[in-house]
Amino acid sequence: MDSWRKSSHSGPGDGNECVEIATTASHIAIRDSKAPTRATLTFPPTAFAPFVDALKDPHVHLGR
């Protein structure tokens, strides 16, 4: 993937400590901006919004 972009919320200063996202017609990928050569998470477009919603919901248990 060549078109990685950072969140508009990353801002200056600690702006390198965020996730980056890349999209294509078939999938959406996210990676850690501090370690861009490491693993990425890849989702079909229909699964990405539910994933983000689960991260925002304090009642969802994410295996911690």
Image: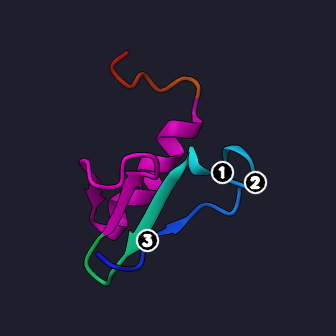
The CA distance from mark 3 to mark 2 is: 18 Å
Provide the residue span drawn in magenta: 28-57
At horizontal 42% and vertical 21% (from top left) the residue drawn is 61
Question: In the structure shown, which secondary structural element does the residue marked by tag 2 occupy?
Answer: loop
- Which numbered marker is on residue 15? 1
The picture places residue 32, in percent across and down from the top left corner, at 42, 48
Q: Which residue is mark 3?
A: 4
Q: How is the image coloured?
A: rainbow
Of 12 and 61, nearer the camera is: 12
At horizontal 40% and vertical 71% (from top left) the residue drawn is 22
Name the N-terminal-most of marks 3 and 2.
3
What is the quadrant of residue 43 in the picture?
bottom left
The picture places residue 26, in percent across and down from the top left corner, at 25, 78
At horizontal 24% and vertical 48% (from top left) the residue drawn is 39
Is residue 48 a member of the stretch shown in magenta? yes
Is residue 31 a member of the stretch shown in magenta? yes
Q: Which residue is mark 2?
A: 12
* Quadrant showing the C terminus: top left
CA neighbours of label 3 inside 10 A, class few (<14), some (14 to 19), many (20+): some
Say what amino acid the circle numbered 3 marks.
Answer: Trp
The picture places residue 24, in percent across and down from the top left corner, at 33, 81
Say what amino acid the circle numbered 2 marks.
Answer: Pro
How many numbered badges does the structure rendering display?
3
* Quadrant showing the N terminus: bottom left
Question: In the structure shown, which secondary structural element does the residue marked by tag 1 occupy?
Answer: helix
Q: Is residue 18 left or right of residue 22?
A: right
Of 25 and 8, nearer the camera is: 8
Query: Furthest residue to the front?
Result: 13
